[in-house]
Image: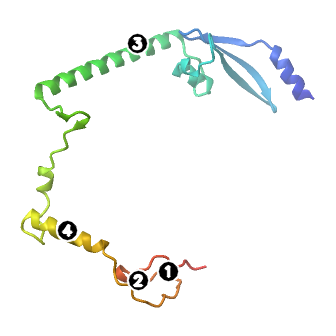
Amino acid sequence: MSRLWARVAGLFRSKSFIGADKTGNKYFSRMEEIDGLVKEKRWVVFRREEDPTSVPVEWICWLNGQRKRAPTPEELAELEARRERVKLNVARLKKEEEERKAREGTGRKITSIGKVEGPDLTSFVRHFPADSKGDKPEEASEEADQSRSKEHEPESVTAEPPEPKTTEPSGSGSSFRPGTWQPPS
């Protein structure tokens, strides 16, 4: 019953106005006793509709207890100016990058609507040795096509006795059978 009374009394206690941000949101705090511990409760009263995205990062940190002191108006003004400088620098760098690409002509050319030219792989392919099965690329691709077609042909099925289940993995390569090994129990 005393907890309930303490909560009701806490509603009528004075709350401390801590500050406001540039959008008009107001921040408050109050000391509250919870289970014998005195803790500071912090909250925000929104100016218009409750929009958590309108709360600046500095105030979010204060509300979550990551900051002990609330941000000062001078600190907020300094951080806002820094954010503006960063935005201007980003815009300037994007413009310089576009100008550099225009000068060098390194931008990809559009060959047809919605498609972009693929990467040039000739320098990448030079790093690999020639295929040992064929001297010419056409021969190698023909052999690869033949080996692929053999994979899809049905093989003759021979009746093999099922392998006994063991506690150790067995088989490798062509003798490997998925699902035959069971972990020791």
Position of residue 165 relative to residue 178, above or below, is below
Mark 1 or mark 3: whose residue is earlier in sequence: 3
Q: Nearer the viewer, residue 122 or 155?
A: 155
How busy is the neighbourhood of tag 3: few (under 14 within 10 Å), some, or many (20 plus)?
few
- Measuring from the top left, give residue 148's x and y in whole percent: 25, 69
Marks 4 and 1, how far apart at CA = 32 Å
The answer to whether the residues at label 4 and label 2 have Cβ atoms under 8 Å apart is: no
* Residue carrying label 2: 171
Q: Earlier in the sequence, mark 4 or mark 2?
A: 4
Q: Amino acid at mark 3?
A: Ala
Query: Mark 3 or mark 4, which has the lower sequence index?
Result: 3
Distance in Å between CA atoms under marks 4 and 2: 28 Å
**Is label 3 in contact with label 4 (beta carbons under 8 Å)?**
no
Q: Which residue is mark 1?
A: 180
Foreground of the two, 151 or 93: 151
Q: Is residue 160 left or right of residue 30?
A: left
Please, what secondary structure does the residue beneath circle 1 have?
loop
Amino acid type, residue under disc 2 in the picture: Gly
Q: Mark 2 or mark 3, which is nearer to you?
A: 2
Q: Tell me the residue that label 4 is attached to.
A: 144
Residue at figure coordinates x 52%, y 22% from the top left: 57
The quadrant in which the C terminus is found is bottom right
